[in-house]
Amino acid sequence: VPVSELVKQLRAHLGPGSADYVHWGATTQDIMDTALVLQMRAALAVIEPTLEKVIRALARLADTHRDTLMVGRTHGQQAVPISFGLKAASWMTPLLRHLERLAEIKRRLLVVQFGGAAGTLAAIGRSGPAVQEALAADLDLAVTSVPWHTQRDSLAEVAGWLSMMNGSLAKLAQDVILMAQSEVGELRETADHTRGGSSTMPQKSNPVISELIVAAARTNATLLANMHQALIQEHERATHGWQLEWLTLPLMFNLTTTSLKKALFLSQNMVVDERRMHDNVTAGNGLILAESITYALSPTYMSRATAKELVSEACQQVVVEKRHLVDIVREKTDASLDWESLKDPAAYTGSTSAFIDRVLNQAERMSLLARRHP
């Protein structure tokens, strides 16, 4: 640790009149921990506005593409129609929660450390709390009830926040990787085809930005265990947990900040192929409408169980005969339904638009977006 030599040099420069008062009542950990807090505050001053920019970019995607039809996938398989706007709103939602969490965490995290040798400030006598509060005021930090030399929960908490936020960004990135697959082709990271090029295959444009975000999130998830191990510290001043934090927390901040910058680029530059999204919806000859047809038939025309069995049989015929699911089901029942309307996947997106509005309204309430409605 550099504090002993720093104190020695400061005393030498100040001279005998003031030298004795340098580091009066403090201990090395007071200086190192307070410096760490100031560094984290500076890092969060970069992270928070970048996170807000990512949210705004995703909000634009959500609003612009609220009616852009695409396949909703569960367990990697086509499920029901959704809109790309809903997917963008879903990417955005946990980021709003992370902003709320950060506001709470900062109240516990941005605190001064000044407790002396064993957390009593005995060298300052009864003036300890007043000196501590004055130091905190000079640094624009808060104070805790007692010095926190071996109480490291706030550091573990911010590490958890970094890992969670990186994980939310990686969910976005993982979706981009899957949607950018050649066979799917619904998204590209950017219109710049030179990005992500292969050393040997000229046709490739690898999703390298998304890959980095996912790798960073997985690394942070493993590093988080270190911060939880560092919570186990003995007595009033510990031996090794402190150093474990030094090895871990700066890297977690670096990885998360890098991921945020990459996610901002993604959210501002991704290319949405609306035509390919629509083609993927219709490519299955209506199989994506199996649930909607089942609900349309029951309970008016048959029980739900009977309807599901009928539609399941029809789905197998679609695979063999390559005909539209609605046409096959229509042949199997005398139900009086608007069969042509049932063929429209856009008619089965439920409350998609309302959910998007909820997310955008939440961002408005948090003063992240200009009001869309006067």
Image: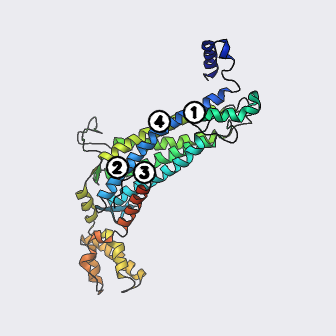
- Mark 3: few/some/many CA within 10 Å (<14, 14-19, 20+): some
The answer to whether 35 is drawn above or below residue 106 in the figure is: above
Report the residue marked by disc 1. 139
Give amino acid for label 2: Ala
Q: Nearer the viewer, residue 269 or 197?
A: 269
Position of residue 48 measured from the top left corner of the image (x, y, whole percent): 45, 43
Within 10 Å of disc 4 (Cα), the crowding (few <14, some 14-19, many 20+) is some
Image point 50% across, 41% down: which residue? 220
From the viewer's perspective, tell me whether residue 300 is left or right of residue 131.
left
What is the three-letter code of the residue carrying label 1? Leu
Q: Earlier in the sequence, mark 1 or mark 4?
A: 1
Q: Mark 3 or 4 closer to N-term?
A: 3
Q: Quadrant of residue 364?
A: bottom left
Residue highlighted by disc 4: 254
Q: Which mark is residue 171?
A: 3
Q: Which mark is residue 57?
A: 2
